[in-house]
Image (cartoon, coloured by chain):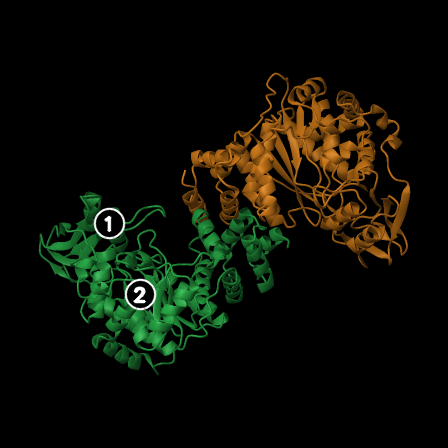
Chain colours: A green, B orange
Amino acid sequence: MNVPEFIRRKREGEALTPDEIKEFIDGYVAGNVPEYQVSAFLMAVFFKGMTPEEAAAFTRSMLESGDRFDLSDIEGPKVDKHSTGGVGDKVSMILAPLMAAADCIVPMVSGRGLGHTGGTLDKLDSIPGYKWNLNEKDFKKVLGKVGCAIIGQTDNFVPADKQLYSLRDVTATVESVPLICGSILSKKVASGVEALVMDVKCGSGAFMENEERANELARNLVEIGTALGKPVSAIITQMNQPLGIAVGNALEMRETIDILKGHGPSDAREITLVLCAEMLCLAKKAANPVEAHAKLSHLLDSGAALDKFKHWMEAQGGDPDIIDKPSLLEVSDETDVVEASRAGYVQSVMTRDIGVACNTLGGGRMKKTDEVDLTVGLLIHKKPGDKVEKGEPLATLHHRGGKGLEDAKKLTANAYRLGEAAPAEELKSVIGEMRAR
Amino acid sequence: MNVPEFIRRKREGEALTPDEIKEFIDGYVAGNVPEYQVSAFLMAVFFKGMTPEEAAAFTRSMLESGDRFDLSDIEGPKVDKHSTGGVGDKVSMILAPLMAAADCIVPMVSGRGLGHTGGTLDKLDSIPGYKWNLNEKDFKKVLGKVGCAIIGQTDNFVPADKQLYSLRDVTATVESVPLICGSILSKKVASGVEALVMDVKCGSGAFMENEERANELARNLVEIGTALGKPVSAIITQMNQPLGIAVGNALEMRETIDILKGHGPSDAREITLVLCAEMLCLAKKAANPVEAHAKLSHLLDSGAALDKFKHWMEAQGGDPDIIDKPSLLEVSDETDVVEASRAGYVQSVMTRDIGVACNTLGGGRMKKTDEVDLTVGLLIHKKPGDKVEKGEPLATLHHRGGKGLEDAKKLTANAYRLGEAAPAEELKSVIGEMRAR
């Protein structure tokens, strides 16, 4: 193919055909199209975007570059959720067993945290014995038995995305909406899902900081999913405060179990139920979100989801005793407290800085090669709208030997904006606009 | 340096500092910044442009990447001309000895033709014995003795441009104005010029097909030249018809000698005089273009320029007998004629197609590796505004054994648009808007 001409046409905003997009991606994966041409193409896409048809062809080409899990011999609707990444987001570990309890199949292939956001695999690493590196056969065995499983990417899982992701990272083309959509959707479709609910985070702790960008991403995910023949529903949720109370790997796993027991912070529980209700509707197991919500609340409160969680742990090697002995999820007992410098109301929390504070303590990675300490993190005591007295604790920091403590305290203290009056009600709401499927 | 952040800032339209631009270009030439990052940067520049300061720093960084001819021990103002490329453009070979006759130094480093346009080195290759591959020492020797010299690039001549040019070619980033300016100006400044006149071609045979783009390029060249401390004047000339009558290497050299003898087509003579007049003003050897034009016309008509041409040939190994025996410039005697299919007036000539017809006969290269036959080409008998009878010759094609003849005839015939009425006068004019220095 004439690659410069292919790039030029994208540069001029002309639409590319599915066949030539596939030839380009295949050529890249095979090593025949050099990276310097791919990166010029990615930058042209950053400026000119893609039509839904182009983006679907791009996603399909990536999808076809490697393994594609065949779950057709497992009974039940295969549904999944994907979040664009936030702080304190432990939804996946609650959602997977809850949906399994509702007779759905959740074939989740997850990743690690990077930047200020956490990653599901890191959180699961805090569970003694949990094995995330299953092959396709064992993954399907767990899915057939339990209904849910969470694993890491297999070696030949969407290699086009692995290559493109690394290249985007070093060429300042990460933020392009069609490239983000292709990366997410190719992996989800490769994992065998039939329908997907997207949790598009928006706010100070999200990659999409404003609603316009979040809406654009949501709309594109729905359009491209449709073009691929996979129903996608996107829900925009606020990430202007950490989700729940716990930020940090073992701390978040403890909170996960709290919520599965019917306790825990209401925002994390509610977001989980809203996302699951949407999934249940896509799976045609409920007529509408209201009916779905009621059914799922019952499954959570009755202990059915917790029961599934136990079976899931047993199936993937995790110690099920963590349910009754949360101390098996090791949290550092060295703590320090960030106190309010004045009395007033919490106006806002710069949520990204809370995520960075957790990283600073050792709880996440800013570079891929950083080691993660699963035992550190933060407990958030005050959220937007809360009234505080001077000297009252805003957050407790679990650290290891004081590592990164001073910086983390500064980041946390500065993340809180306090004011005289209570903030407007909308600042406190967590679930934003829901997009039509 | 943080290269992704550098690219991201350009992508967002932020201005880059001279130091970081230099670090980036140095890193690229040294092999420390990979091509996939450079190409993403080039595409970001395509979309976001550069400020004059950025473009000057970019040009300076390229300039500093290799040899830089020091002409300070040669007396006289060092001036040069550069054209953006056209069809039938033999100006350089007339202009260089003419300016030398006017006591200026013209240190011309030229290139080969590519695409539909011709190249000066190819034209010079038709002169028996002419040596273009001089080193800096011999180049300076000729300049000191004659006042003008035309050579090809030395091995270490602006290596950053060599690398960037190849990369732009395969990543669809050739057309970016600041990248074009950097490429042109870095080479011109490296060749030792103190002032430059740019011939920006505009029209159906030029790379800039419309006036808006030609104006943008002209304005940028002047601005960046100023920022580099080198006066640049840009003149926009029409390339809506081949320049002169001859198109093809040996044919154009024959026409060159005609013009140096005071004969030849008036459009090529007039453009040369206008460009030279501008150069003479920049060199402060004339008070204004009118005075300069009169002086230069005299040098041409008196034979002083032809005399310089002879000395130049002797100094660079070319056979001076070509002046009296044009047959030494070998032209194929196999000819065919394209005739007018109807009576009427020539409305326009698709000039690019005339250039492509010459290539098709073997007279140019569409790919760098194509071999060039110096003996083939076209003589253009009818130009826009000319009245023709049905069956009258429009052009004579010199071919070799019929190679490419049928295609070239078709291209030539289709390039002519004939109509009932004479075209508007402006269509026939050759010299367009002149830009202020």
Task: Say which quadrant the C terminus of chain A sits in.
Answer: bottom left
Q: Residue at x 43, y 64 (%)?
A: A136
Residue A265 in view here:
no
Residue B391 coordinates in the image, percent (x, y): 90, 55
Q: Is residue A218 left or right of residue B363?
A: left
The amino acid at mark 1 is Ala
Q: Nearer the viewer, residue A153 or B261?
A: A153
- What is the quadrant of residue B343 in the picture? bottom right
> What label sits on residue A357 in the rendered view?
1
> What label sits on residue B120 in the rendered view?
none
Q: Secondary structure at mark 2?
A: helix
- What is the quadrant of residue A304 in the picture? bottom left
Looking at the image, residue B390 lies above or below residue B124: below
Task: Say which quadrant the N terminus of chain A sits in.
Answer: bottom right
Q: Is residue A48 left or right of residue A279?
A: right
The residue beneath circle 2 is A92
Q: Residue at x 46, y 63 (%)?
A: A186
Q: Do marks 2 and 1 both belong to one polypeptide chain?
A: yes
Residue A154 in view here:
yes
Tell me the chain of label 1. A
